Amino acid sequence: MIHVGEPLSVLNRQTILRSKVDRWYTYIGEDNEDLYLRNYQDAVAFRPHPIQDIRRARLGSPRDPIRIPKRWASFVLGRVQGRSLLVRDPFSVFSIQWFAHTLGFQIVVVVRHPLAVVASLKRLGYTFDFRNLLEQSSLMNERLERFRSDMENATASTDVVEQGSLLWRIVYECVAEDLLELPVCFVRHEDLSRHPIQEYTQLYERLNLPFNDRARRIIEQHTNDQNRKEVSVKNPFEIRLDSRANLDNWRRRLDGEEIGRILSATRPLVDRFYPDE
């Protein structure tokens, strides 16, 4: 499996796309697929774009001279060994139908409880500018028009709890719609964290992937109790954590009033995805 990370992140300069996107959660559909389709098809076929990659390289960057050849090498390996492509990109969530219908991708969606999501946003001080969504006419017309008023109100606010709760609700209402139409593999972050080996074994089976010793070893290394209990504020992208300990971190970050607001804003979706909690 050859991994490509977050092509639709506005921070991703070394993307598989022609150029990086300028809005979070960029929507891809029939109206604009000509901007993206060829690049995703090339990635699936492991065809690199050396000239584009070199043009995007930062002069004097210590990482780009390593990162770019590394991806070229992985594409060569993928093509020679007949591997599959794994695109990990939470910002493609509104475009799931396009990826499934146009590219034939198998889709995996991971839901994380809104209390944990908002608690992390609060701790890291992350706010969201809903103009990223409001200014995408196709996305609004096809999927998000019913949220317009709430998004406009949240845009004028700096309340992380309000913004995070609304974004979670928007994302997972769209996911709930997609679950009715597509064979999406839907898993809960909490289940993966509590029982990593068991849950990943089942996920691999659903995706018709072999769960071998290497996969088991990597999962154990990234989830065992010797890892950090929570991510560092300075490095929020740390992927090796004590997955079970991390489940309860939100309890120290939210007060009772904030918990009530989050749950009020995200029901009945929370009840649907977490009927046992």
Image (spheres, rainbow, N blue to C red):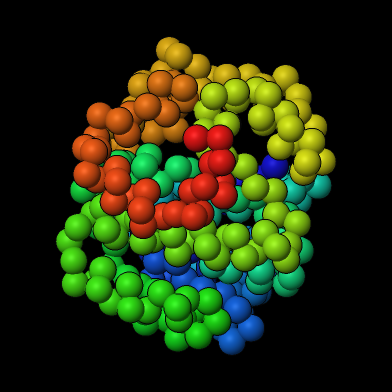
Question: Which of the two residues, 92 or 11, is positioned nearer the viewer here?
Answer: 92
Q: Tell me which residue sits at (48%, 43%) in the image.
A: 112
Q: Position of residue 35 (x, y in %)?
A: 56, 80
Question: Which of the two residues, 158 or 17, is positioned nearer the viewer here?
Answer: 158
* Image-based side of 209 in relation to 17, left or right: right
Q: Position of residue 43 (x, y in %)?
A: 65, 60
Q: Tell me which residue sits at (70%, 42%) in the image.
A: 1
Q: Is residue 173 above or below residue 198?
A: below
Q: Position of residue 102 (x, y in %)?
A: 73, 72
Q: Position of residue 223 (x, y in %)?
A: 51, 23
Residue that sits furthest to the top in the current view? 226
* Image-based side of 167 in relation to 205, left or right: left
Q: Is residue 205 above or below residue 10?
A: above
Question: Which of the two residues, 272 or 164, is positioned nearer the viewer here?
Answer: 272
Q: Tell me which residue sits at (43%, 70%) in the image.
A: 21
Residue 252 sits in which quadrant? top left
Q: Tell me which residue sits at (40%, 46%) in the image.
A: 114
Residue 276 seen in the figure: yes
